[in-house]
Image (cartoon, rainbow, N blue to C red):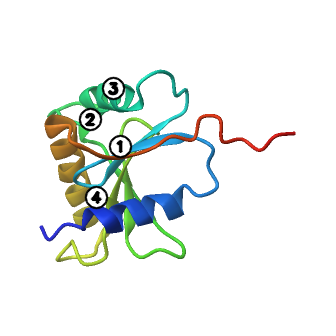
Amino acid sequence: MIGVAIDELIDVWQRLLADSRKSWVLFEHGTCAVLTAADGELAEQAIELLKQFGPVRAGSSAGDFGVLDLKGIEGWLVTGQHNDVLTYVGPDEPQDQSHISVGLLGRSKRHLDGTELRVVHIEDKRGSADPA
């Protein structure tokens, strides 16, 4: 696994979520927790979300994934059992660019993020709404 540099991950997620007014937290291996009801300490909220929905558990829906092709950004998003937990897979990461290979790689990255829980960036969008 090659991986994507942290500054590149931050750039990708800022572009992907540019139009979103939701806060988000990025983890070391490319998993992003989008916080739809951001309250209190964002890192703590995201860590709790990833503790529950990041690790892969055999025989459960935690092993399920979907692969989304991105428009305007190279790479893929890998979804899981929670709609607000998404993992970015860069175009140079998978040896095989089939959806199954990309999905398995994204799932393994989500598992690492869900067990290691290392936050690398926080985007706090609370209070950033345009005044009416």
Q: Residue at x 18, y 32 (%)?
A: 59
Q: Are marks 4 and 2 in contact (CB under 8 Å)?
A: no
Q: Which mark is residue 57?
A: none
Q: Earlier in the sequence, mark 4 or mark 2?
A: 2
Q: Are marks 3 and 2 in contact (CB under 8 Å)?
A: no
Give the residue pinned by disc 3: 44
**21 is higher (above) or lower (below) than 68:** above
Identified by mark 4, the residue type is Gly
- Furthest residue toward top: 40
The alpha-carbon separation of the residues under discs 4 and 1 comes to 9 Å
Q: Nearer the viewer, residue 67 or 91?
A: 91
Q: Quadrant of residue 18?
A: bottom right
Q: Quadrant of residue 5?
A: bottom left
Quadrant (top left/top right/bottom left/bottom right) for the C terminus: top right
Q: Earlier in the sequence, mark 3 or mark 2?
A: 3
The alpha-carbon separation of the residues under discs 1 and 3 comes to 20 Å
Q: Earlier in the sequence, mark 1 or mark 3?
A: 3
Give the residue pinned by disc 4: 103
Nearer to us of marks 1 and 3 is: 3
Q: Are marks 1 and 2 in contact (CB under 8 Å)?
A: yes
Q: Residues within 10 Å of mark 3 (few under 14, many from 20)?
A: few
Q: Which mark is residue 80?
A: 1
Task: Provide residue 105's location: percent of width, then percent of height.
Answer: 20, 59
Identified by mark 2, the residue type is Ala
Identified by mark 3, the residue type is Glu
